[in-house]
Image: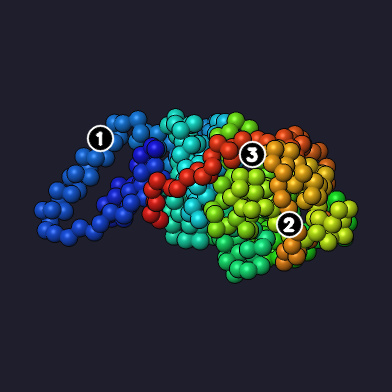
C-alpha cells in the first residue's frame, strides 16, 4: 500500500494523525520540555524533507491537485460489492480514484486487490472514514481535489430496513446530506447517485419507467427517495451536474474473477438471493429458503429484474461521462425483463450443478410481487444497454469466484482507525 503523506505541515504539527495507505493511526500526545518539542519538530521536518524526495510523496500529492486531462472521482462505499466493481472500472478507464469507506459492509481485502492491480502513483487511495462524521468528511474534501463524487455507500437490505428503520434513515438520508454539504463547501459540482428501484414501491403498471410514481413501501426505499429529493432540491439552487441511477436486483461478479460478493456472515439472512443460492450449493446452509410462494404471479414467486454488476457499473461510468452543469439525469438501470425467483433458482442450480433444496416460507415484510424496468430512456440518452442478460452465465461467473474464495475475502488483516 502506498504511503499517504497528503497531510499538510500544519496538521502534522498538531499531532492529530498520519495516514498510511489511507489507514490512519493515532499519534500519541507528547508532553515535555521546549527542547523535546524542538527536537520533535526537527525530526518531522527531516521526515518531510526525505519524503519529498521519494516517489511515494510525489504520487500522493497528485490527489490534492487538479490535473488537466485527469478526472478524480471520490467513490463512497468503494470497498463494498458494487462500489469495488465501480472502482475497478474507473481505474481501467484511467480515472483517479479515492475510496472512502467505514468498512461496516465493505472489504479491505478488495481494496488491496485493486491497489495491487493499479499500483502506479496517483491512481488509487483509500481513506477509512464514516460519512456521518461531517468533520472527517470536510477534512477529506479539503485535502483532496475531487472532480466528481460517485455515491454508493449505504446499507441496502429491504428486510433489515423494516427491522432497523432509524439506522436506514440515518445511514442513507442523513449521510447523503452530509456528502452534499461537503461538496457544496468545497466546490465539487458533479454527483452520480446510486439509487434503487425500491423508491417506486409496487407500481400498478409494468414495466417501470422514470415517470412511474415513487411510492416506496419499506424504509430502504423511503430513505433513498428522501435522499433523491434532497439532491434534486439542492441542484435547483446550483450549477451542479447530477445523475441519479435507480437500479434493480444486482447479481454477478467481475468476469476475470478478481472481485466478487462477500457479505458478512451475520448478514446472510438479509442478503441477495444469489448469495443464499451459493451458500446452499456449498452446503453452508442446509437449503434455500424462499420468502413468499403465494404472490399473484405466474408461479407464485416474486418477479424481479436482475442486472449484472458489470453492466451496472458501466451505466454509472456512462452517466459520469454524460454529465452537464445545471442538468439532472434520472435513469432506470435494468434489463427490461422480469424473472421469477423460481426461474432464478433454476438458473442457479444449472450454474452450480447442485440440486438445491428449496423451502417456501411466508412473505418477507416490505416486499412486493413484481418489479422490472423499462430501460428505454437510458438506452436513448446514455447509449447504455445491458449485455450480460443470461441469468445462468452471470451466475456461473459469480459461482467461479465463490468457489475460489470459500471464505470470501477472508478476515481483514488490519483494522484501520477513523481519521
Q: Who comes first in sequence, dot 2 or dot 1? A: 1
Q: Which marked residue is nearer to the observer: mark 3 or mark 1?
A: 3
Q: Quadrant of residue 205?
A: bottom right
Q: Are marks 2 and 3 in contact (CB under 8 Å)?
A: no
Position of 227 with respect to 413 (left or right) is right
Q: Which marked residue is nearer to the observer: mark 2 or mark 3?
A: 2
Position of 205 with respect to 324 (left or right) is right
Position of 67 with respect to 222 (left or right) is left
Q: Which residue is depicted at the point 75% across and 41% down?
A: 347
Whether residue 112 is situated above or below residue 40 in the rendered picture = above
Q: Who comes first in sequence, dot 2 or dot 3? A: 2
Q: Residues within 10 Å of mark 1 (few under 14, many from 20)?
A: few
Q: Which residue is mark 2?
A: 359
Q: Secondary structure at mark 3?
A: helix
* Residue 119 vs residue 320, the one in the foreground: 119
Q: Position of residue 207 (x, y in %)?
A: 85, 50
Q: Position of residue 22 (x, y in %)?
A: 41, 45
Q: Which residue is depicted at the point 67% across and 48% down?
A: 277
Q: Quadrant of the C terminus?
A: bottom left
Q: Who comes first in sequence, dot 3 or dot 1? A: 1
Q: Quadrant of the N terminus?
A: top left
Q: Which marked residue is nearer to the observer: mark 2 or mark 1?
A: 2
Q: Does the rendering let one see residue 176?
A: no
Q: Are marks 2 and 1 in contact (CB under 8 Å)?
A: no
Q: Residues within 10 Å of mark 2 (few under 14, many from 20)?
A: few
Real-space Cα distance between discs 2 and 1?
A: 64 Å
Q: Which residue is depicted at the point 76% across and 59% down?
A: 360
Q: Which residue is mark 1?
A: 50
What numbered label is drawn on residue 398?
3
Whether residue 340 is situated above or below residue 388 in the rendered picture = below
Amino acid at each position: 500500500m502506498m504511503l499517504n503523506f497528503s497531510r499538510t505541515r500544519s496538521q502534522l504539527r498538531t499531532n492529530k494523525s498520519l495516514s498510511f495507505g489511507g489507514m490512519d493511526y493515532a499519534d500519541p500526545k507528547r508532553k515535555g520540555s521546549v527542547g523535546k518539542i524542538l527536537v520533535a519538530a526537527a525530526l518531522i521536518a527531516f521526515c518531510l524533507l526525505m519524503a519529498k524526495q521519494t516517489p511515494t510523496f510525489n504520487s500522493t500529492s497528485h490527489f490534492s491537485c487538479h490535473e488537466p486531462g485527469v478526472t478524480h472521482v471520490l467513490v463512497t462505499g468503494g470497498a463494498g460489492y458494487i462500489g469495488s466493481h465501480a472502482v475497478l472500472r474507473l481505474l481501467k478507464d484511467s480515472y483517479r480514484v479515492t475510496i472512502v469507506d467505514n468498512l461496516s459492509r465493505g472489504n479491505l481485502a478488495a481494496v488491496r486487490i485493486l491497489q495491487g492491480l493499479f499500483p502506479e502513483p496517483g491512481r488509487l487511495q483509500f481513506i477509512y472514514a464514516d460519512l456521518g462524521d461531517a468533520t472527517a468528511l470536510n477534512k477529506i474534501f479539503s485535502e483532496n481535489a475531487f472532480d466528481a463524487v460517485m455515491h454508493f455507500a449505504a446499507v441496502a437490505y429491504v428486510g433489515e430496513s423494516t427491522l432497523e428503520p432509524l439506522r436506514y434513515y440515518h445511514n442513507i438520508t442523513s449521510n447523503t446530506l452530509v456528502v452534499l454539504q461537503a461538496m457544496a463547501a468545497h466546490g465539487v459540482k458533479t454527483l452520480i447517485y446510486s439509487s434503487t428501484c425500491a423508491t417506486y414501491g409496487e407500481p400498478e403498471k409494468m414495466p417501470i419507467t422514470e415517470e412511474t410514481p415513487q411510492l416506496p413501501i419499506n424504509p430502504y426505499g423511503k430513505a433513498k427517495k428522501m435522499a433523491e429529493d434532497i439532491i434534486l432540491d439542492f441542484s435547483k439552487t446550483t450549477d451542479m451536474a447530477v445523475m441519479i441511477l435507480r437500479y434493480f436486483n444486482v447479481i454477478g461478479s467481475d468476469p476475470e474473477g478478481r472481485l466478487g460478493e462477500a457479505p458478512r456472515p451475520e448478514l446472510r439472512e438479509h442478503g441477495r438471493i444469489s448469495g443464499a443460492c451459493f451458500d446452499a450449493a456449498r452446503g453452508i446452509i442446509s437449503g434455500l429458503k424462499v420468502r413468499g410462494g403465494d404472490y399473484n404471479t405466474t408461479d407464485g414467486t416474486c418477479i424481479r429484474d436482475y442486472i449484472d454488476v458489470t453492466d451496472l457499473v458501466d451505466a454509472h461510468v456512462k452517466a459520469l461521462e454524460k454529465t452537464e452543469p445545471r442538468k439532472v439525469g434520472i435513469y432506470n438501470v435494468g434489463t427490461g425483463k422480469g424473472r421469477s425467483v423460481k426461474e432464478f433458482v433454476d438458473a442457479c442450480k444449472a450454474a452450480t450443478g447442485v440440486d438445491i433444496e428449496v423451502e417456501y416460507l411466508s412473505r418477507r415484510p416490505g416486499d412486493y410481487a413484481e418489479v422490472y424496468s423499462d430501460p428505454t430512456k437510458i438506452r436513448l440518452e446514455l447509449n447504455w444497454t445491458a449485455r450480460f442478460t443470461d441469468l445462468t452465465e452471470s451466475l456461473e461467473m459469480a459461482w467461479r469466484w465463490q468457489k475460489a474464495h470459500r471464505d470470501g475475502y477472508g478476515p481483514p488483516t488490519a483494522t484501520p482507525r477513523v481519521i
